Amino acid sequence: MEDTIVAISTALGKSAISIVRVSGPDAILFVKDIYKGVNLLKAPANTINYGHIYDGEEILDEVLVSIFRAPKSYTGEDIVEINCHGGIFVTNKVLELLIRKGCRPAEPGEFTKRAFLNGRIDLTQAESVMDVIEAKTTNSLKLAGFGLRGDVRKMIEDFRKEILNMILKIEVNIDYPEYEDEEQITAEFLKPVTENLISSFEKILEKSETSVILKEGISTAIIGRPNVGKSSLLNALLQEDKAIVTDIAGTTRDIVEGRVDIGGVILNLIDTAGVRRTEDVVEKIGVEKSKQMIAEADLVILVFDYSLPLNEVDLELLKLTETKTRIIVINKQDLEPNINLNEFQDYLLMSTFNEEDIENLKAKIKEIYRLSDLSEIDFTYIGNARQVAKLKQSKEALADAYQSIIAGQPVDIINIDLHHAMDYLSEILGEVHSLSLVDELFANFCLGK
Ligand SMILES: Nc1nc2c(ncn2[C@@H]2O[C@H](COP(=O)(O)OP(=O)(O)OP(=O)(O)O)[C@@H](O)[C@H]2O)c(=O)[nH]1
Ligand SMILES: [Mg+2]
């Protein structure tokens, strides 16, 4: 990381200000070359300095330049942030000047990557940076904050300490074999600790499902025969006339998408073409798409018409969604019934014209995903698929260790699995090789005699 990188850190477009960020050993020097104002080389850390950017002899823009000095900066390197006017041309021009001076254009995420490599943040925090940027609801922001503040790291470190403690006990045992009953005592100590850890890991893994939903939202496909009110339902949930609604069957021909926050969780809604037997080529494609949407959705809202008897398409759709998470909506409650309700076990009888019904539907969705009381949700969580996979592996290694413990295996066998369990945790933090196990052992425990 000897080069100095540069990038525009704000979204490129017309705005009040733009920020061009420079990080690396020559950051201050390069900016100094295109800037007139105070002497940046002598500017103290964490100061904002007024001045002008020059393109040769010509003033390009009036700017504020923030100076951060290594190691107390986001990346751990010298960082300069130029606040220039937020025009696309002027911002690009500042970037271009810096590249001409010798800066290299940064790769995506490279500032955060440097922060990680320089030990400013661990991998879970680095991953949370993205989550904060991507957050779409208060809850997903809360989750991301948990990771960003280092709470995930702390949680993983605490688990790791417990495993280390067990390893330590075993290694004392191996080093001092003259105490004969020591091995038995050790096994008795290991059993409950391992058991507790496994159950904690399981709880976290369970919760990770909820957090994925809070983070990504629920992809929801609205499916049903033509004219049952799918688009009306989409519009009612979105509270806008996004999809065209008519009394002509086959109104929706393509997919219509919309996103709505239903009180802390995002529904990613997809309205589809009505499913029917048809020879119309365009409509056929639409029907195929609906089937594909059923396969891809987390949740299917299957809509039926209260005033019409079920036909074979309805039955086929019921069958097609049997194993999916689904909500059966029987719409047009205001009309005369002609449907045979005995075909259904669980359904929501409603009308898309009725606001209260729409609220009930939202509540039902939250209930299915156990999100009814979002204030009760505990935000201790693991942030993403990578972390979840590693935690699972660690749990499996612990389960192996547990099996060996109850089978009365020699402690050095157990020790191998415990080491694996610990390594997976270290991988979550992204520091597998940087930490010497031996150092940590001595830091925690002094053998002394
Ligand atoms: N009586 C009554 N009519 C409704 C209700 N909901 C929707 N409709 C009407 O049903 C007709 C069809 O509604 P759409 O929302 O276009 O139905 P769709 O399922 O999207 O139809 P396609 O796009 O053709 O598959 C429209 O005339 C709506 O006004 C309801 O709760 N009660
Ligand atoms: Mg429609």
Image (tube, rainbow, N blue to C red):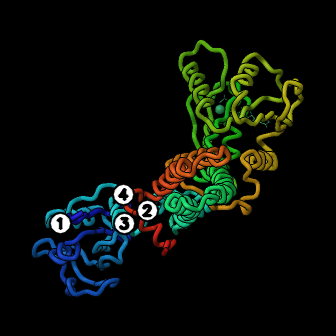
Residue farthest to the top? 279
Q: Nearer the viewer, mark 1 or mark 4?
A: 4
**Residue 145 at least partly seen:** no
Residue picked out by circle 4: 109
Report the side of 24 relative to 75 (left or right). left
Instruction: Identify the mark nearer the N-term, 1 or 4.
Output: 1
Picture residue at 27% right of the left edge, 74% below the top: 78
Q: Position of residue 147 (x, y in %)?
A: 53, 63
* Image mark for residue 97: 1
Instruction: Identify the mark nearer the N-term, 2 or 3.
Output: 3
Residue labelled 4 has its Cβ within 8 Å of some atom of ligand 2: no
> Label 1 to label 4, Cα distance in Å?
22 Å
Q: Which picture quadrant has residue 434?
A: bottom left
Q: Residues within 10 Å of mark 2 (few under 14, many from 20)?
A: some
Residue picked out by circle 3: 115
**Is 409 located above or below residue 125 in the figure?**
above
Report the side of 184 relative to 128 (left or right). right
Instruction: Identify the mark nearer the N-term, 1 or 3.
Output: 1
